[in-house]
Amino acid sequence: PAFVRRLAASTARHRRIMQSSLRTLAAGRRVGRALASAPLAGAVIAPVVARRGPSALIALRACSSQSAASAHPQVIEVEPPADAAASDEKPEETEEDRALRPREIVAYLDRYIVGQDDAKRAVAVALRNRWRRQRVDSPLREEIMPKNILMIGPTGVGKTEVARRLAKLANAPFIKVEATKFTEVGFVGKDVDQIMRDLVEAGMAMAKVKAVEKIKDKVAAKVEERVLDCLVGATNIQHNREAFRKLLRMGHLDDRLIEVEVPERKPSGQGDPANGNGFPMNEIILRFDKMMHGRQKMEKREMSLKEAVPILTELESEKLISEDDIKRQALWSVEQEGIVFIDEIDKICSRGDYRGSADASSEGVQRDLLPLLEGSTVTTKHGNVNTDHILFIASGAFHFCKPSDLLAELQGRLPIRVELKPLTEKDMYTILTEPEPNLIKQQCALMFTEGVQLEFTDEAKWRMAKLATQINRDVENIGARRLHTIIERLMEDLSFSATDRAGDKVVIDADMVQERVGELAKKSDLSRFIL
């Protein structure tokens, strides 16, 4: 019958499958016995970790049950090919890394600051050491502390200018503070911990800018779609939408009024005047409102398209950026790369004869600065900040006191001392001519806006430099700031009448400089010589 034939065929098929399986099993056992007797017995797969580049390995494991228990792990390493070895070379430095070389830092500062080579070299080495420390292995990296710098020199020689230019050059959280704005703990005013809070805010702003830069293309696309929704509606046909998109990109719709949803405006509150460290009241209200409702309230507002794009860009960026990641990145950059420039540190220094005064901005502030410079943990609203690896650069003129009048502990925390030299007549001339935004070029540009062509002869520039040096020596040494006084006195009449002299060409020579500015040199302070 048909049933019997189907049963016989199925039995024969199962018999062939069984025989094939037995042959495969026998072959596997023969391979296992062969591997068990070879030197490779018991080799296990294990990665060979190289510091750079790919690495190759061959790892086999005996599948014989008889030899598995007695086998010892064995790793066989094979040399990588030539092209892989070539990839083990040190990667090339990026453009940002090359810009932080000491020679390039000094060259950048030379474009704006005349002389003071020692200060420039010290700052350049300190910045490069930050980069070097990040490339040291971890156990030793934590032990490398920054060498804080104390710059000493008369006023007007470039101490503060170094800080201004350094802030633009350093791609790291940077803050410049005046030592006189802080008071001792227990007095009304800001304490020194506010330095770290301000530095964290600078780090948060920098981290947010970097995060927004990474997603700017995606944000721009989303903003464009939202603007088009406001212009033509979300359900309009594609042809009209693309036509408006073209007009939008060409800038023809910048003045069109649209209605967008923006965060609801809160009335601005006032901070507590008795607490210099308190948060503004409107910030506390916004935090509480966000905590209670989960999201910020929105309102519809009509505005021009040109005004709406920055607001929509910020709103879309906040949706794509993780606030926790921003805080984590900001705190790391502040702790590892932060730089604090403390100006006018000599103003919180008392002479040795007047130690222990009741001034709230004197030695008490020095004592409060000690833990910051040595290394401590400061609490901020974004998290705790450790100051162990933050670089501190302090500067002061020290006219009425000496660096040795600082607390001994504070002197020890500023191990590198750089003395800035007074400016000579040649330095004054260089300040007038060589820096990119020099004073002569500024005055010519200001007069050009009125249609007046202004020109200074070379003899006039030398006479201005000579008068500045002479007045600084005889009256009061205020450094390069004396040039501002001379130029303003020289340009006083022309600045007043420039609106009536459009199209004129004015040439200033040495005689004109002597005539208008020479009287300043005669007004020496004779009271200094009266007993």
Image (spheres, rainbow, N blue to C red):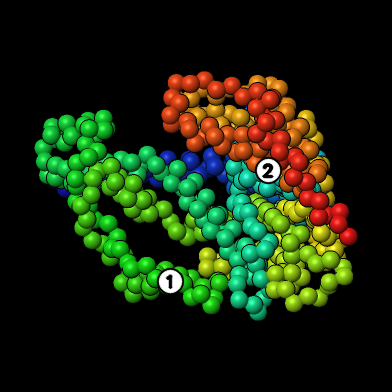
| Inter-mark Cα distance, 2 to 1 | 38 Å
Which residue, as the protein is rendered here, is positioned at the far bottom?
A: 186
Q: Residue at x 65, y 34 (%)?
A: 516
What residue does disc 1 label? 270
Work out which quarter of the rendered image holds the C terminus and state it. bottom right
Q: Residue at x 30, y 40 (%)?
A: 221
With 212 as the anchor, is 221 left or right in this view? left
With 209 as the anchor, is 419 left or right in this view? right
x then y, percent, for residue 449:
45, 29
Mark 2 packing: few (<14 Cα in 10 Å), some, or many (20+)?
some
Nearer to us: label 2 or label 1: 2
Q: Nearer the viewer, residue 255 or 390?
A: 255
x then y, percent, for residue 22:
46, 44
What residue does disc 2 label? 481
With 153 as the anchor, is 207 left or right in this view? left
Which element carries disc 2, helix, strand or loop?
Answer: helix
Three-letter code for the amino acid on which mark 2 is drawn = Arg
x then y, percent, for residue 317:
37, 50
Q: Nearer the viewer, residue 531 or 478?
A: 531
Instruction: Indicate the quadrant where residue 175 lies.
Output: bottom right
